[in-house]
Image (tube, rainbow, N blue to C red):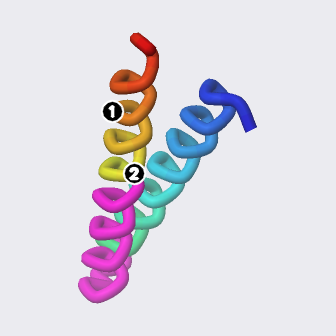
Amino acid sequence: MGNEKMFELLDKLIERSERWSKDAEKRKDLNSSIFYEGQTKAFEEVKRMFKRNIDNYSHL
């Protein structure tokens, strides 16, 4: 999988988690809301780590 495809996939996962978190908030389902917020943060961290890895090796 190429870098661009990986970023697209991560963006889709982030968007999905954000949508699900907002939906859980509307339903007043605090446990699910917190779970999806954590999931969003985890995907964002993976995206940052992936980008950092690419940046570190792009100059070689």
Nearest the viewer among 48 and 40 is 48
Give the residue displayed 37% in from the left and 22% down from the top.
Answer: 55
Q: Which residue is mark 1?
A: 52
The chief SS type of the magenta part is helix
The region drawn magenta spans 26-43
Classed neighbour count for the residue bearing mark 1: other residues with Cα under 10 Å, few (<14), some (14–19), many (≥20): few
Give the residue displayed 25% in from the left and 84% down from the top.
Answer: 30
Mark 2 or mark 1, whichever is nearer to me: 1
Query: Callout 1, which amino acid?
Result: Arg
Q: Check the picture and name the quadrant holding the N terminus.
A: top right
**Cα separation between marks 2 and 1:** 10 Å
Magenta span contains residue 19: no
Q: Which comes before the other along the chain, label 2 or label 1?
A: 2
User: Residue 25's spot in the image, x, y percent?
Assistant: 30, 71
Judge left or right: residue 40 versus residue 8.
Answer: left
Q: Name above or below for residue 4 compared with residue 39.
A: above
Q: Which mark is residue 46?
A: 2
Residue 41 lies in what quarter of the image? bottom left
Q: Name above or below for residue 59 compared with residue 35.
A: above
User: Residue 27's spot in the image, x, y percent?
Assistant: 37, 78
